[in-house]
């Protein structure tokens, strides 16, 4: 039985033919094998851990669709991936990974090679799913093609701070005089105000973080003149509390929550994910009125970077900015530089093109409504 026909709950095996190469594929990936490949890939991040995929499935209602590829040379490659449950394969949606759950891509000993990427993309194109999305991490991006048959290529960029050499090199060589001045000012202001920073993964810290997220949603609603209850409900669906509870509980050594409190009240919080040589700034929210004047966001970033350096991380990835200029400046002012990658979409129907058209129509309607109110 081919992998296109087997029931989704049963393990599947099939041969992958692309060019002159042949690979054997298995799905889902046994966790023991996955862990071995994960440890051998220098570009691996917390997003690539099997526990991370388990959280996606448990919280988001996805199924494990991970794939293990064995090459003719004896190399083992892992593609972490999830699938929306469905009766018909032709209507199934697959992702590595869904929005809000970070980057996926292919894991391989020493890093994936370009010809291996080509073979796996060819396998995904022939898979039969309605849509498959793969977004590899920035460190693996050089092995991925600019174009591939049957694949929609969407450029992305993230900001990354180089941690090589540790804090001494950051302070003396990599951070500008203005950056050093801002960070020292943030430390002084925090000390004078009596700011307290807690770090860990406890349920209390998760609750404090989520409370700040809800307050951020309320502020966003006021700024955009939208109904607060509607914005809150949408925000809670997009980022449910259970998501952060699951990550903190399932990856206690990886998930690190920093919460800054003033007079016992949380005013800012961040979540970073530490694995091997990578530290990822995953989420951050603050009380703008209190945290802004005290530069608490800068201070939490400094503390996160210090922790990353302490455990020997090579990179501090700050993620995408969604085209928000102020957010890009904030990251650049901390010494982070743009790194380019891409999202790869394999579609049986032109869903991306249709979505782009709908977005343009929606944007035009919103512009007219805004002009009418002015």
Image (cartoon, grey):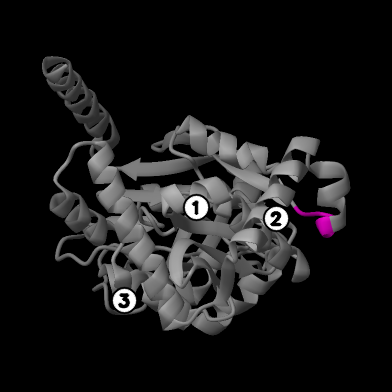
- Write down the residue under mark 2: 188
- Write down the residue under mark 3: 58
Question: Mark 2 Cα within 10 Å, few/some/many (few <14, many 20+)?
Answer: some
**For the residues marked 2 and 3, what is the alpha-carbon distance in whole angstroms?**
43 Å
**Which quadrant of the view contains residue 206?**
bottom left
Q: Secondary structure at mark 3?
A: helix
The residue under the point 45% across, 33% down is: 324
Image coordinates for residue 35, horizontal then vertical, percent: 59, 78
**For the residues marked 2 and 1, what is the alpha-carbon distance in whole angstroms?**
14 Å
- Sequence-wise, the earlier of marks 2 and 1 is 2
Image coordinates for residue 142, horizontal then vertical, percent: 65, 42
Question: Mark 1 Cα within 10 Å, few/some/many (few <14, many 20+)?
Answer: many
Q: Nearer the viewer, residue 144 or 366?
A: 366
Range shown magenta:
163-167
**For the residues marked 3 and 1, what is the alpha-carbon distance in whole angstroms?**
34 Å
- Is 164 included in the stretch rendered in magenta? yes
């Amino acid at each position: 039985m081919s992998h296109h026909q087997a029931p989704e709950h049963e393990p599947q095996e099939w041969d992958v033919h692309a060019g002159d190469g042949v690979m054997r594929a298995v799905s889902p990936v046994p966790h023991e094998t996955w862990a071995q490949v994960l440890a051998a890939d220098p570009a691996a991040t917390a997003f690539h851990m099997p526990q991370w995929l388990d959280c996606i499935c448990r919280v988001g209602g996805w199924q494990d669709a991970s794939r293990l590829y064995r090459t003719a040379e004896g190399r083992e490659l892992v593609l972490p991936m999830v699938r929306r449950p469905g009766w018909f394969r032709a209507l199934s949606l697959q992702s590595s990974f869904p929005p809000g759950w970070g980057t996926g891509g292919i894991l391989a000993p020493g890093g994936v090679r370009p010809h291996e990427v080509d073979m796996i993309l060819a396998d995904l194109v022939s898979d039969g799913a309605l849509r498959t999305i793969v977004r590899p991490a920035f460190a693996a991006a050089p092995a991925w093609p600019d174009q591939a048959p049957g694949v929609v290529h969407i450029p992305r960029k993230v900001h990354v701070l180089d941690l090589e050499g540790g804090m001494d090199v950051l302070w003396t060589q990599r951070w500008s005089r203005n950056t050093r001045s801002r960070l020292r000012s943030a430390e002084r202001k925090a000390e004078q105000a009596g700011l307290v920073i807690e770090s860990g993964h406890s349920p209390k810290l998760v609750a404090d973080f989520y409370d700040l997220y809800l307050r951020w949603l309320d502020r966003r609603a006021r700024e955009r003149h939208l109904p607060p209850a509607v914005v809150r409900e949408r925000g809670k669906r997009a980022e449910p509390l259970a998501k952060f509870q699951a990550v903190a509980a399932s990856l206690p050594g990886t998930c690190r929550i920093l919460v800054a409190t003033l007079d016992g009240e949380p005013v800012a919080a961040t979540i970073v994910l530490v694995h091997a040589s990578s530290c990822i700034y995953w989420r951050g929210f603050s009380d703008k009125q209190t945290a802004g004047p005290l530069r608490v966001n800068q201070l939490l970033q400094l503390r996160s970077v210090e922790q990353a350096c302490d455990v020997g991380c090579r990179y501090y990835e700050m993620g995408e900015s969604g085209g928000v200029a102020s957010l890009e400046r904030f990251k650049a002012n901390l010494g982070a530089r743009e790194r380019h990658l891409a999202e790869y979409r394999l579609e049986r129907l032109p869903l991306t093109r249709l979505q782009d058209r709908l977005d343009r129509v929606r944007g035009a309607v919103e512009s007219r409504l805004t002009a009418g109110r002015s």
